Image (cartoon, helix red, strand yellow):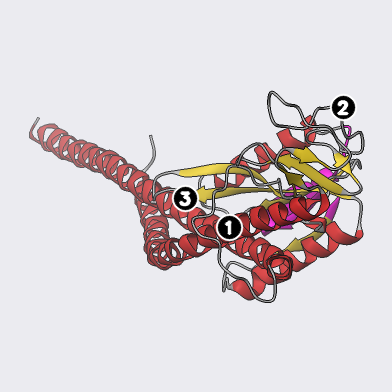
Amino acid sequence: MLSLRELRRKVKSVKSTQQITKAMKLVAAARLNRAQERIVSARPFAQKLVYLLQELAYLHAKEKARVDIPVIAGIRRGGSQDVNTGMGSAAADDSLPPQGGIHSGVHVMDSPLRGERLLTAEHPFFAKRLSHRVDVVLVTADRGLCGAFNANLIRTALQFMRERKDEDVRFWAVGRKGRDYFRRLGATIEKDYVNIFHRLGFAQAEVLGKDLIDAFLHTNTREVVFIYNEFKSRLHQRLIIRRLLPIEPYEGVKPRQDFIYEPSRGAILERLLPRTFLAEVYRILLESQAAELAARMTAMEAATDNATEIIESLTLNMNKVRQAAITKEIAEVVGGVEALQN
């Protein structure tokens, strides 16, 4: 049984900790409100930008398909027409690549309209390579005290690395926790970005995005994968593993209206692809920041509630010890009086 002095010291210590956790909860809640507003306002822009990119990629691919591989009234250049189907026979043109294959550095995909075979734009972001290098961007927090936020991300990254043990997995660490863990583990860390969430803006996302684009264009990187937490609500975050590069060919896009683009669809697409990538990187960082603040607020709220329960338990024990001491003193006084009377 602890003494009354030790119990009082423990109660004082727990109250001090409770004040810290309560203050951290209030700070996280205030920052979360601003982060939530930013992510809610950033999502529509990113979605519209991706949709515009899909439309341009589809229309540009359709235009190039008509120029490079003409399909007129079901007759391909050098092929014979099938009378029953109105389409060229499969053996008519051996120069055509198979579906989904690579031909002259251009990817072939099927169009959702009338089965036409369309070519995607000749952009490096669509390039598919046979190398073994995979760049993983792990987005963790710079600090702890946010529950299982960092642990779940690190565990997922470890599982990803074990599944790709035959490949050259290289990490781009965003956040101090992920960087420190994989540095101790001996993993390959290409570059780290710490303390960027304190004043997160598009400039920080632009630095990260441009470094990733430069690495993808000038190295043999096969794909760029992001591992991060997506903000769903204050009580729920979803862990995401998402590949941003190379970009998959877009299918199923039906433009609502074909506009006249100046200078051209291809030129706009050339400028829009990196901008869309940077916008997606910025949105991912905003999602991770909001998820981290939500996790910290929930963890600090739980810690504050636990501190309240501990204080109540210690106070109860303290009262019991004090009552037992008073009862003992009364018993000693009564016993002394009886001894004097006898």
Q: Which residue is mark 3?
A: 295
Query: Which of pointers 1 and 2 lies earlier in the amino acid sequence?
Result: 1
Q: Is residue 216 above or below residue 204?
A: above
Disc 2 marks a residue whose amino acid type is Ala
Residue 34 falls within the magenta-colored stretch: no
**From the image, which quarter does the C terminus lie in?**
top left
Would residue 235 be found to the left or right of residue 141 on screen?
left
224 or 286, which is in the foreground?
224
* Tag 1 secondary structure: helix
Q: Which residue is mark 2?
A: 91
Can residue 4 be seen in this snapshot? no
Q: Position of residue 83 (x, y in %)?
A: 72, 26
Q: Which residue is mark 1?
A: 50
Give the residue at the far top of this rendering.
84
Front tag of 1 and 2: 2
Question: Residue 38, located in which quarter of the rendered image?
Answer: bottom left
In the image, what residue occupies the spot 70% across and 41% down? 73
In the image, what residue occupies the spot 36% across and 44% down? 306
Q: Label 1 to label 3, Cα distance in Å? A: 29 Å
Residue interval drawn in magenta: 166-189
Q: What number is the disc on residue 306?
A: none
Would residue 244 be found to the left or right of residue 297 on screen?
right
